[in-house]
Image: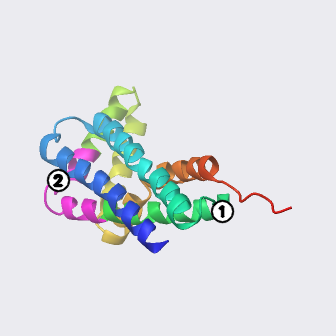
Amino acid sequence: MKKTILTFGLISGGIMATMMVITGLIGKNMGFDKAEILGYSTMVLAGIMIFVGVKSYRDNTNGGFITFGKAFKISMLIVVVSSMIYVATWMILFNTIFKDFMEQYGAAMVEKAKASGLGAEQLAAKKEEMLKFKEMYKNPFFRAAITFMEPLPVGVIMSLIASFVLKKKQPSVV
């Protein structure tokens, strides 16, 4: 089981990490909205490794059968490994390519708030919120936790689907 989890977790994490690096190198000017769409699309693509990993374990290690619970456990551990690769990649990129990320992100969020027609008071509150977030984001543990939470919802959803679709009970012995 460990081999399956590590193999498919590393592949999935590698897919997300590679796309993050590519986006960092060539997509700096694409805007946060497009980068977010690309990022979550990549997470879904990388999540296919959850299906492949659970199916591989079921068919090659577990005799062609797996319960929902066992499939969910394996798939979530694949998600954890993959997410750890994602976080490690972001931590490196944040300290190299994206040193000005928080300034750019804060400015983009304030600009988005302006465009939505917020009043002066709400705009000032948004600026204050972004300043507080920027300060919290300086803490590497906070930054890692926030980053870990990005692929997690996608991974949980894909794990639930994979576990439901791939479960296969052993036939009852009569």
**SS at badge 1:** helix
The dot on residue 69 is 1
In this image, 125 relative to 171: left or right? left
Name the image quarter holding residue 23. top left
The residue singled out by tag 2 in the image is 100
Q: Magenta part mainly helix, strand or loop? A: helix
Along the line of sight, the residue nearer the viewer: 64 or 7? 64
In this image, 96 relative to 148: left or right? left
Magenta stretch containing residue 86, yes or no? no
State the count of labels.
2
**Label 1 or label 2, whichever comes before in sequence order:** 1
**Which residue does the image show at 33% across and 58% down from the upper left?**
11
**Which residue does the image show at 48% across and 48% down from the upper left?**
154
Magenta-colored span: 88-105
Image x and y of residue 76, in percent: 52, 62
Magenta stretch containing residue 100, yes or no? yes
**SS at badge 2:** loop
Q: CA distance from mark 1 to mark 2?
A: 43 Å
Residue 171 in sight from this viewpoint: yes
The dot on residue 113 is none
Farthest residue to the right: give it.
Answer: 174
User: Relative to 49, is 44 above or below?
Assistant: above
Image x and y of residue 80, in percent: 45, 65
Q: Are marks 1 and 2 in contact (CB under 8 Å)?
A: no
**Which residue does the image show at 81% across and 63% down from the upper left?**
173
Name the image quarter holding residue 33. top left
